[in-house]
Amino acid sequence: MVNHSKKTYMLVACDYGPVGNGRQIELAVAGMVAAGHRVCVVLLSSCGGLATRLQAVGATVCVVNERSAVRVLVTFHVAKIIRNEQPQVVIGWGVETAIIVGSARFLARLSGHSWRYIQLVSQPSLTVVEAAMVARADQIIVMGESVLHACERMELLQSIHFVPPAAVAFDEMIDRELLASQIGLDPGKKWTLCVAPLIAQSRIDRLIWGFDQMAVARDDVEHIVVGSGQLLRRLQRRAWIEEVDDSIHWFDHLPILPSLFRHVQLILQSGTVAYGGCLLEGLSHGIPAVVIDTPTSRDVLGDSNAGILVPTDPGSEFARRATELLENEKLRTRCASAAQRRAEEMFNKETSLGKLLAVLDS
């Protein structure tokens, strides 16, 4: 790896779980530290468990909000940390950080301290207001083709860089029987996994219909849903009405989630979520996926055989293809091999980190 002069980089981000954005932050921070840089991460929320993972790879972590929701009032606290740490570069990770980092930069300029502002965007659904906030950055990093196209439509092209995300398997390993006892699963059944924020925009409500249809064909499947949000109670009630609630295990966050990937048979994603929720981690572990065809899921799966992209209509197609993958061992094996190849070829860790460091050092 190329030697880089030691700099102080600061990331401003929400407290994510160990997959999706959380995994990308962890890999990026580990790479920056390994390259000899000093890294400080400011977390605008809590309850995701990211702080512990980042400290383990050598970052300094500051949590400025004990709640799960981001508050604009933390801007002054963030500005103070930036003033104390004196970073050369500040990276806002996720569009929800743009207004805080942009405001902190304005405050810094009033005090005579300047730094380069880079904004990373991981989802394509930019509104006009969000685009205006992102446009304040000196440079923009996108981690998906669909996000790049969205920025093109918003004319955010002056200093935009495409950095592919990384797909890396977890080292964590817990025995299936022990794992099942810890989180209340049946070790004798097949497990599916969905990771997503339980909010209206993610369209995760389609999952319950899929679970109901799958239960008609198979009664040996349990579903793990990891996420939180205002849809939770509604989804649980719908599951109860459809009489599939006994097969669903809900977790707002799951610290041992990384260990699940060696035991899950199928990843399901019915909504629009950054990185497909846990699709990248699924690729690296060779787990077949059935997902609704959205720009974000296509960023990960493309037209490969690593999983099955399903149209929104008819709704029964999602459950039908998921059941097919569970029942067809040869198809599942082919998808698993294709998933691992795609992870290595399209989402190689060294390639991703090399491009990220090139942008940061430019």
Image (cartoon, helix red, strand yellow):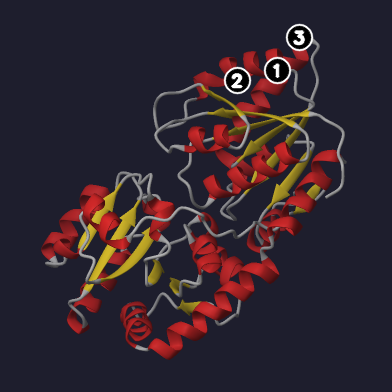
Q: Quadrant of residue 153?
A: bottom right
Q: How many marks?
A: 3
Instruction: Please report the residue visible at 75 percent of the width from the left and 11 percent of the height from the top.
Output: 110
Q: Quadrant of residue 326?
A: bottom left
Q: Are discs 3 and 2 less than 8 Å apart at CB?
A: no
**Mark 3 or mark 2: whose residue is earlier in sequence:** 2
Measuring from the top left, give residue 345's x and y in whole percent.
69, 71
Which residue type carries mark 1?
Glu
Look at mark 1 in the image and give the residue it sits on. 85
Asked whether residue 319 appears in the rendered view, the answer is yes
**Mark 2 or mark 1: whose residue is earlier in sequence:** 2
Q: Is 97 placed above or below 190 here?
A: above
Q: Name the foreground residue: 184 vs 221.
A: 184
Q: Secondary structure at mark 1?
A: helix
The nearer-to-camera label among 2 and 1 is: 1
Q: Secondary structure at mark 2?
A: helix
Look at mark 3 in the image and give the residue it sits on. 111
Q: Secondary structure at mark 3?
A: helix
Look at mark 2 in the image and give the residue it sits on. 78
361 with respect to 223 (left or right):
right
Q: Name the foreground residue: 103 vs 360.
A: 360
Q: Residues within 10 Å of mark 2 (few under 14, many from 20)?
A: many
Which residue type carries mark 3?
Ser
Q: Name the foreground residue: 294 vs 335.
A: 335
Measuring from the top left, give residue 339's x and y in whole percent.
56, 74
On-image quarter of the C terminus: top right
Asked whether residue 107 appears in the rendered view, the answer is no
Distance CA(mark 2)–CA(mark 1): 11 Å
Distance CA(mark 1)–CA(mark 3): 14 Å
Q: Is 64 placed above or below 289 here?
A: above
240 with respect to 81 (left or right):
left
Q: Name the foreground residue: 214 vs 48.
A: 48
